[in-house]
Amino acid sequence: MSFEIVPPSIKGGNTTTEVSALLNNLINLECEAKGIPVPTIMWYKDGRPVISSPQALYVDRGQFLQIPRAQVSDSAKYTCRVTSAAGAAEKIYAVDVYGEWELVELAICQVTGGAFWKLLCLPSASSLCRPVGGNGSPRLR
């Protein structure tokens, strides 16, 4: 009698997946693993094991890691590592959690006619802004 052995694999495991979430929202990370024998799933946050808790739940034997109310401190590199007697595989998530949107008025340089613009920005993330009103043609320096 022979047994088939299949090394573990993870759906989408060859790339790092970037995940952005707003403060207090749900983050759901997936680790769809296959292999014979069935692999064991462990999650890591910045290289440290994540223990299932109300703040970070293992769901369906670890195939999902849920963070019910994301905090800025949850921003990190999360790794799903699957292991069995046949080998190991990993999938990486780069998670960024941002605060609530806030309205910021900015003076714009090099605009004709004394123009101004209001931008809606995430705190401490000036690259994540969108115009919500103003006049003229903005040229930021």
Image (tube, rainbow, N blue to C red):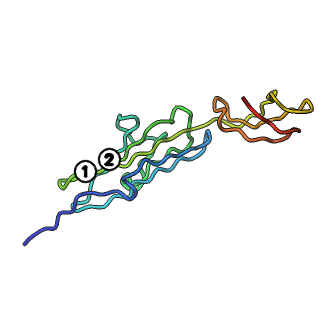
Q: Which residue has dot 1 on it? A: 88
Residue name at image x 50 percent, y 46 percent: 18
Q: Quadrant of residue 124?
A: top right
Are dots 2 and 1 in contact, CB under 8 Å?
A: yes
Taking 4 as reference, is 62 left or right?
right
Residue name at image x 51 percent, y 36 percent: 75
Looking at this view, name the residue that lies furthest to the left. Answer: 1
Q: Nearer the viewer, residue 65 or 79?
A: 79
Q: Secondary structure at mark 1?
A: strand
* Quarter of the image that includes the N terminus: bottom left
> Is 42 located above or below residue 75 in the figure?
below
Residue name at image x 25 percent, y 50 percent: 88
Q: Which residue has dot 2 on it? A: 81
Please provide percent x and percent y for residue 52. Answer: 40, 42
> Is 24 located above or below residue 39 in the figure?
above
Q: Nearer the viewer, residue 43 or 91?
A: 91
Please provide percent x and percent y for residue 81. Answer: 32, 47
Q: Amino acid at mark 1?
A: Ala
Taking 105 as reference, is 4 left or right?
left
* Quarter of the image that includes the C terminus: top right
Q: Secondary structure at mark 2?
A: strand
Q: Amino acid at mark 2?
A: Arg
Please provide percent x and percent y for residue 47. Answer: 35, 35
> Is 136 located above or below residue 86 in the figure?
above
Q: Quadrant of residue 97?
A: top right
Taking 12 as reference, is 9 left or right?
left
